[in-house]
């Protein structure tokens, strides 16, 4: 029985923390900042995938395509960082 109360208490704390975090972050960022953050997150995710794929590729043509993609993603990330 104690475990049930404990888990509900922990669940409540997690929900409280998450809602506090969401409200404070969302209120402080403008729509433009949120859009820029979303684009940056998307680019970082793509970059991570490309880096992972580069480590596994054997075909030189495919490797060149991935390296070109990586350069493009890094250029876009640099653009976003310069706009701050």
Image: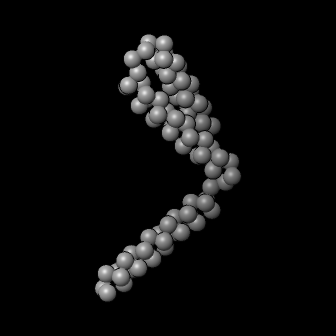
Left or right: 7, with 63 as reference point: left
Name the residue: 48% across, 13% down: 61
* Residue at the image point whose x is 51% and y is 64% from the top: 21
**Residue 29 location in percent, x, y?**
62, 55
Q: Is residue 9 left or right of residue 81?
A: left
| Residue that appears at 52% across and 69% down | 20
Answer left or right for 68 relative to 31: left
Q: Using the rendered image of the protein, determine whether residue 84 is visible from the camera's viewpoint.
A: no
Q: Nearer the viewer, residue 11 or 37?
A: 11
The N terminus sits in image quarter:
bottom left
Tell me if residue 56 comes above or below residue 16 in the rendering.
above
Q: Position of residue 39 (x, y in %)?
A: 60, 41
Relative to residue 28, is residue 69 depicted above or below?
A: above
Find residue 57 and report its image quarter: top left
Residue 17 or 79: which is nearer the viewer? 17
Q: Quadrant of residue 53?
A: top left
On the rendered structure, is 73 left or right of 14?
right
Is 26 above or below relative to 79? below
> Residue 26's x, y, as percent?
61, 60
Q: Which of the image's four quarters has the C terminus?
A: top right
């Amino acid at each position: 029985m104690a475990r049930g109360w404990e888990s509900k208490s922990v669940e409540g704390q997690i929900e409280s923390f998450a809602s506090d975090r969401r409200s404070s972050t969302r209120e402080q960022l403008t729509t433009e900042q949120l859009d820029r953050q979303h684009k940056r997150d998307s680019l970082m995710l793509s970059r991570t995938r490309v880096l992972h794929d580069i480590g596994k590729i054997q075909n030189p043509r495919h490797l060149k395509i991935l390296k070109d993609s990586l350069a493009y993603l890094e250029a876009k990330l640099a653009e976003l960082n310069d706009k701050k």
